[in-house]
Image (tube, rainbow, N blue to C red):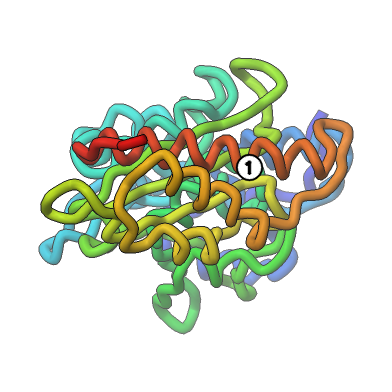
């Protein structure tokens, strides 16, 4: 069923890097929810695999001394949804990954795999973009950290050099403190489906809860890779909250997104729901932050 040349099991992160150096054609496998399906379809026939599934140091969510939230790359979607740190500070991420597949997939699928496959429809990706996540990468030359916006290069390709692996996703304190967010996934079915479009919005309100001090808007399936709607963000920043502002910001996203026609939805339909989802997610984020929306 699975045509592979060899499977090497890493016992530590340095050992995994060593195995990748010794076998430059090898690919990493973690939960296997993507890789094994592709192998079964014959897309990776004869592949060499380096399994990192047993590396417990890459699992779990922790709060570092400076307030950075660290999510190990092998942390499953189910773990993230139930984790108390995520629930307290970035509950929207737990809600987003709880929309991935079914329970079995969420139990084995990892946030590292979900981001490293480079697909625009990954449910975690748009929320991580909206929260200015940082990707930690470990290789033979040590550790480097880059913004998630730089990690995605093009559809299906991320910035992992030979003998490198993603080891964590970091959320700096400045990225989440005082912010509240909401994620909406539009799909053809209510569950166990790939997103036709995903929109994640978070806001930071002024002290009087009347103005948008900051707003961050990110999309999945609105372009070849997840993206931030920077023109729409700039349009709403500093404005007094009202229904008119929601409409104004939602319309502005058309300057940022580049959806395409596919069998799931036309470009025109994706543009329409992009505006609608932005307004709805923005409204929910404002309400979660304690704001009031005036007519």
The relative height of residue 258 versus residue 265 in the rendered view (above or below) is below
Q: From the viewer's perspective, tell me whether residue 294 is left or right of residue 198.
A: left
Q: Is residue 14 visible?
A: no
Residue for point 56% across, 25% down: 105
Quadrant where the C terminus is found in the figure: top left
Local crowd size for mark 1, using a 10 Å CA cut-off: few (<14), some (14–19), many (≥20): many
Q: From the viewer's perspective, tell me whether residue 119 is left or right of residue 67.
A: right
Considering depth in this image, is 250 or 157 the residue closer to the camera? 250
Residue for point 61% across, 16% down: 190
Residue for point 72% across, 44% down: 271
Q: Is residue 147 visible?
A: yes
Considering depth in this image, is 115 or 121 the residue closer to the camera? 121
Residue most toward the bottom? 141
Residue 117 placed where, x, y %? Answer: 65, 51
The relative height of residue 56 versus residue 151 in the rendered view (above or below) is above
Q: From the viewer's perspective, tell me whether residue 125 is left or right of residue 170.
A: right
Considering depth in this image, is 166 or 21 the residue closer to the camera? 166
Q: Quadrant of residue 26?
A: bottom right
The relative height of residue 130 versus residue 56 in the rendered view (above or below) is below
Residue most toward the front? 295
Residue 75 placed where, x, y %? Answer: 39, 41
Residue 229 placed where, x, y %? Answer: 55, 59
Residue carrying label 1: 274
Q: Quadrant of residue 231?
A: bottom right
Quadrant where the N terminus is found in the figure: top right
The relative height of residue 133 versus residue 209 in the rendered view (above or below) is below
Residue for point 40% across, 30% down: 95
Q: Secondary structure beneath disc 1?
A: helix
Residue 234 placed where, x, y %? Answer: 45, 66
């Amino acid at each position: 069923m699975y045509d592979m040349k060899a499977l090497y099991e890493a016992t530590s992160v340095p050992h995994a890097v060593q195995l990748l150096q010794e076998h430059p054609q090898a690919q990493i496998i973690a939960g296997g929810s993507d890789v094994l399906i592709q192998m079964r379809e014959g897309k990776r026939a004869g592949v060499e695999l380096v399994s990192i599934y047993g590396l417990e140091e890459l699992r779990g969510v922790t709060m570092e001394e400076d307030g950075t939230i660290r999510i190990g790359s092998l942390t499953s979607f189910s773990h993230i949804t139930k984790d108390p740190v995520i629930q307290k500070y970035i509950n929207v991420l737990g809600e987003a990954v709880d929309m991935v597949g079914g329970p079995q997939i969420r139990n084995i699928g990892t946030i590292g795999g979900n981001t490293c496959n480079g697909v625009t429809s990954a449910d975690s990706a748009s929320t991580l973009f909206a929260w200015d996540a940082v990707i930690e990468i470990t290789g033979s030359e040590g550790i480097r950290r880059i913004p998630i916006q730089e990690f995605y290069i093009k559809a299906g390709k991320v910035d992992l050099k030979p003998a490198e692996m993603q080891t964590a996703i970091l959320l700096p304190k400045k990225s989440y403190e005082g912010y509240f967010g909401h994620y909406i996934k539009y799909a053809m079915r209510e569950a166990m489906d790939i997103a036709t479009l995903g929109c994640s919005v978070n806001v930071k309100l002024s002290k009087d809860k009347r103005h948008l001090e900051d707003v961050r808007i990110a999309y999945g399936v609105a372009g070849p890779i997840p993206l931030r709607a920077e023109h729409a963000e700039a349009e709403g920043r500093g404005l007094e909250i009202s229904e008119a502002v929601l409409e104004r910001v939602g319309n502005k996203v058309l300057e940022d997104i580049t959806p395409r026609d596919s069998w799931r939805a036309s470009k025109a339909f994706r543009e329409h729901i992009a505006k609608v989802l932005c307004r709805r997610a923005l409204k929910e984020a404002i309400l979660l932050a304690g704001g009031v929306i005036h007519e």
